[in-house]
Image (spheres, rainbow, N blue to C red):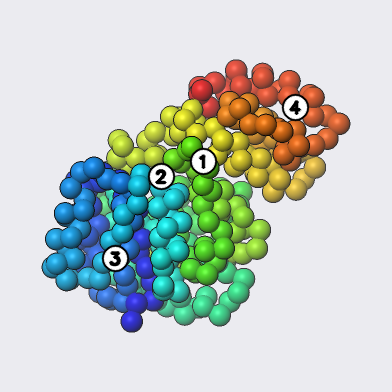
Amino acid sequence: MEFITIFTPTYNRAYILQQLYDSLCRQTCKEFLWLIVDDGSSDNTGDLVKSWVAENRIRIDYRTQPNGGKMRAHNNGVRCCQTPLFVCIDSDDYVCDNFVESVKPYWEQIKTDHHLAGIIAYRGFPTEGNGFLPKCHFPVKGTSTFAELYSKGYYGDTTLVFKTDVIRRFPFLEVEGEKFSTEAYAYDQIEQEYKYLLAEEIWTYCEYLPDGYSQNEKSLYSKYPKGWAMYFNQKAKFTHTYLSKKKIAYGVLYLIFARRAGLKHIYQQSALKTPLYPLFVLLSYFYAWKWREKYPK
């Protein structure tokens, strides 16, 4: 009986999906379902996956949708999920051979703890010695939020396994007319209520590809201003220290991207509604110029 859904959103990644499929076939525990949501691929992804389904080596649920971006594919996958755990493994990643087996004891620890949203483990990156290591080790043990980890010096990506009933409550942001939004929008909401159990193990392996989001971050800022405006405004809202540097910075970024997106009622929606608001507007024009390379139009 499956206890975890391994979800993969994909778009024109037939050339790289084989390594993930092979790693799933090598799993020492088969109590999982591989759910693939194809975001309107125009390559041979469909034929490839159907050939794997015919092999019947692992359980595969293959679904398609019109091209709408990873966030819509992710929300679609969460809605379809019927197992208590849900993990997103991108099409350019793959998992260790005992991934599912390793998750199981951690699931037993968290299944009845209503304060935990899931499990955070390491994501391994290639080293010069042909091995994989995390970019950084957790600065705390036991349980934590992402905010606590990052505030104590953690950096790098992670493997994030969610309780399905939690991630279903916090869908990724879908913005009309845009095909990308940062997953941090949903994760920041989760952290207002939950922590995660830390697993100091490498569960997934990653090599960034030229066509991936991580390698094209700057273009995401220029193409999808509405989603970024909503994200930065939420960051300002969740930064509770009144007029701290972080809160002001997020508020200024909200103004920059809200103007670029042509949003209406910018002041009414702002998390920085204070008598100093006109000053923040002036600051936003200055920082739009100062940060022009980091956040290009």
Find residue 272 and report its horizontal and vertical position in percent: 76, 37
Q: Amino acid at mark 4?
A: Phe
Mark 3 in CB contact with mark 4 (< 8 angstroms): no
Q: Nearer the viewer, mark 3 or mark 1?
A: 1
Going from the N terminus, do you reach mark 2 or mark 1 first?
2
The quarter in which the N terminus is drawn is: bottom left
Going from the N terminus, do you reach mark 1 or mark 4 first?
1
Going from the N terminus, do you reach mark 3 or mark 1 first?
3
The part of the image, by quadrant, that contains residue 116 is bottom right
Q: Give the residue number, with chain letter if any, for mark 1.
A: 176
Residue 245 visible, this angle: no
Say the numbered circle drawn on residue 13: none
Q: Amino acid at mark 3?
A: Asp
Going from the N terminus, do you reach mark 3 or mark 2 first?
3
Q: How many residues crowd around disc 4 within 10 Å: few (fewer than 14), some, or many (20 or more)? A: many
**SS at mark 4 in the image:** helix
Q: How many residues crowd around disc 3 within 10 Å: few (fewer than 14), some, or many (20 or more)? A: some
Find residue 115 and report its horizontal and vertical position in percent: 62, 71
Q: Give the residue number, with chain letter if any, for mark 4.
A: 280
**SS at mark 1 in the image:** loop
